[in-house]
Image (tube, rainbow, N blue to C red):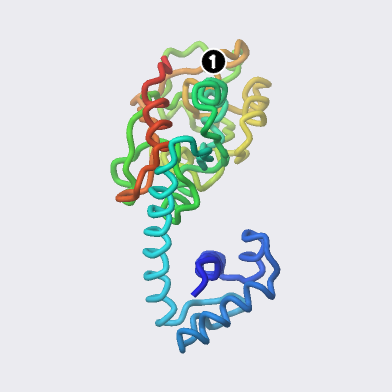
Amino acid sequence: MNINHLNYFREVCSQGSITKAAEICHISQPSITAAINGLEKELGYKLFYRVNNRLRLTDEGCEFRKLTDEFLKQFADYYEQACDLSSGRKTVLRLGVPSVMGTFFFKRIIPQFSQLYPETGLEIYEIATIDGIKMLGNAELDLMLGIKNESCYTNCDSKEIFATELQLAVSRDNPLAKEKSITAEMLAGLPMVIISKGSYHYKEILSHFSHVDLNIVMHSSQISTIKYMVAENIAATIIYKDVFASNPNICCIPLQPPMPAHVHVFWQKNAYRSSAMRTFISYITELDFS
């Protein structure tokens, strides 16, 4: 049984499509098909059946996926521990960062970390927290930065980096810029641009203001777009107060009641933390973000 074929199988499970799995794995569709056929022949049962042009797991396939996920997780731990035996090893950490946080994280963590720890590279993925947590569970990421929600992310361990809060960001020319605090009722009818679906940010805003008819005119994952919309007084947004703190054209106003947010670094629960992971966790949690 080939471990690469197991990875292909897991990707087909995730995508429900050989075509999409082949794109992500950067190999041809016939190679994926051959790998799945080989597994089925070796195991003696079908792994998938087709429904409306999508592949679905058979009962045996569901059980095999559980075994495969557990084995690949154990293999990833084994591999990291084996590599850690070399003190001079070059390592690349796969780090997930939500786009909304990238603006005030990148300039603080990347240059200095690279200078202090040249033996560890950072491969950064801009991804929403909720999606990134799923990638952690599949060992597709090593670490994820995001907001800790006590009711979520039970498959992860984490450590706090710093505490912040969500605030209303408006143009200096907006009448609300004169307010000392913003209630939910004050947002009714206000044109809003907010972060796209799939993020903690999006989920928390819709939950917090579920009783208000928010006038969301645009969803965007691009901070540059959101900044333009707000600075030009086209729309307002609810965002971490740190994002536009240095922008002279944008005013951030506290919400009432407040929306606190605790930024954490996450990793897979019960998984081996490599030397590089431990180094990065120690480094980022000791930084001063005030």
Give the amino acid type for the residue marked by disc 1 in the picture. Cys
At x 41%, y 50%, the residue is 82
Horizontal side of 125 relative to 202 (left or right) equals right
**In front of the other: 3 or 151:** 3
Horizontal side of 280 relative to 19 (left or right) equals left
The answer to whether residue 240 is above or below residue 193 is: above
Residue 95 visible to an observer of this rendering: no
**In front of the other: 232 or 92:** 92
Extreme residue toward the bottom, this view: 44
Point out residue 115 in the picture as x, y percentages from the top left corner: 54, 21
Quadrant of residue 37 within the rendered picture:
bottom right
- For numbered disc 1, what is the local secondary structure? strand
At x 44%, y 46%, the residue is 83
Residue 231 visible to an observer of this rendering: yes
Q: Which residue is mark 1?
A: 251
Name the quadrant of the C terminus.
top left
The answer to whether residue 97 is above or below residue 8 is: above
Quadrant of residue 34 within the rendered picture:
bottom right
Point out residue 31 in the picture as x, y percentages from the top left corner: 66, 73
At x 37%, y 59%, the residue is 74
**In front of the other: 217 or 51:** 51
Point out residue 101 in the picture as x, y percentages from the top left corner: 51, 30
Pointer 1: residues within 10 angstroms few (<14), some, or many (20+)? many
